[in-house]
Image (cartoon, grey):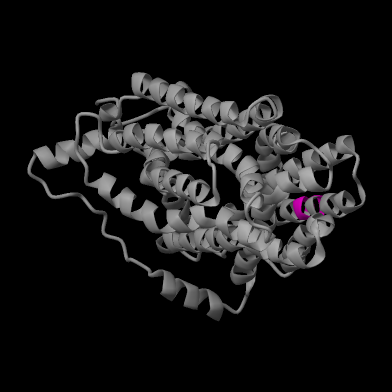
Amino acid sequence: MTEYEIQEKLDIKLTFLIGFAFFCTSISWSLYNQQVPISLLAYISSIAIVGLIMGLDNLVGVIVQPIMGNVSDNTRTKWGRRMPYIMIGIPVSAIFFALIAFETSLFSLLFFMFCFIIAMSFYRSQTVALMPDFIQPQHRSKANSIINMMSAISLVAASLISLFLVDLSLQLAYITVSIIMIIGLIVLILTVKEKNAYSYQLLLMAEASGAEKIVEMKEKVGLKASFKDVLEEDDKSTITMLFAIFFISVGWAALNALLTPYGVIILGLTRGQAGGLMLYGAIAFLVSAFPLAVLAEKYGRRLFIKIGLMIFSVSLILGFFIRDILLVSILILFIGIAYACIIVNTIVIIWGLAPSEKKIGTYTGMYYLFTFSAEIFGPGLVGLITDLTGWEYFFLNGAIFLIIALILMFFVKREEAELTEAEKLAKKKAIQEI
């Protein structure tokens, strides 16, 4: 029996190494969210327009990433089917990322931003697919937690770069992140051999033997049909949960995209200091995410989402009254814990509410439809309200959406569909295979 046919234990070292692909992606996006809004505000006075531009990457991603994911599925090279795109995408995106800091006009800024977004979309779906290509279904939940840790570490790293390098030299900060991306790619190339991935080997074996691609025969349930089913459910928990997720994502996306200019304009921080405001939140998220997930599994995911939304909302409301940097940093630390309470549980509840294993994929699709929609329009929406009220009300404007989400959570009456033990096992297997 070959190593790609069975994995008795999760290869933690390999999973961390695969996580470098996510790290390379996340560290650039983190600094992008921290510093690009300030650059845009030098040319654009409307916070709403800046917010909409900051959501552009998600809009482009929704269009380009599925196409590139499909292309890579049908790619066969000595490097594998994902790595060729990662090997091209990371250096190109690193170049355009560094160039953002050298903009001299609104046109050049938008051009470099757009090229960076396209380059990132060229390989982002492949980084997502790399982990399940190597890790078999029974270990993917644990592997995914490691990948999320790598993303959180990248936010910490980007915040530190903002704090220590941006005020010294904005160009140096961007170049440093670009160099880190290249180093991460080198580590990935030297340590992760996609040709040894179990799923890739099985695919090559099937094709070499002349067999057609093996496709498990499952009833396909369309997104439109599933959405209709959700609307027709007597218990409205699923649709209510999806809208709660939308409002949560609006608040979180707006905070990520517009916190740095708030720090500069209202708190009087330098650009670098304001970019580093998320440091304490990132560390708090990194430390608390796993234990909170364990506690939520024991005491109830809805409860922990409500607790997280309460902490998040109260922190933003208090932030409206506070201008002391230390106190604001403490509030952001609590926001990091609050977001960990929320995000580790939302998609799990959506999976739990799916009425059968056949609908796991489409319920996951609906989850991402609501989150991506919020991430595309959320910064612009909160930005529009902030245009009307002024920067002083930014925290309160974000809190509005989280309070709406909290209210909606009280109308989510369950977090699991009523199923037999056999149906629960089938659903668990379907979730592992996502």
Q: Is residue 405 left or right of residue 196?
A: right
- In the image, residue 333 sits, relative to residue 111, either above or below, namely above
**The residue stretch that appears in magenta:** 307-311
- For the point 48% across and 24% down, which residue is it? 179
Q: Nearer the viewer, residue 316 or 31?
A: 31
Residue shown at 28% from the left, 44% from the top:
72
Position in image of residue 393 (x %, y %): 83, 59
Q: Quadrant of the N terminus?
A: top left
Which residue: 52% across, 46% down?
A: 109
Residue closest to the eye, 60 or 261: 261
Q: Position of residue 106 (x, y in %)?
A: 55, 51
- The reply to whether residue 352 is visible in this rendering is no
31 over 339 or under it: above or below = above
> Can residue 302 be seen from the camera position used here?
yes
Q: Tell me how many marks there are.
A: 0
Q: For this rendering, which residue is in front, 41 or 117?
A: 41
Q: 157 or 32, which is in the foreground?
A: 32
Which residue appears at 67% of the width and 27% of the height? Answer: 160
68 horizontally vs 98: left or right = left
| x and y, in percent, of residue 347 in the image | 57, 54
Q: Residue furthest front?
A: 104
- Secondary structure mostly seen in magenta is helix
Q: Is residue 310 magenta?
A: yes
Magenta span has 206? no
Tell me where residue 385 sits by quadrant.
bottom right
User: Which residue, as the protein is rendered here, is positioned at the far left?
Assistant: 210
The quarter of the picture where residue 362 lies is bottom left
List x then y, in percent, for residue 184: 45, 24
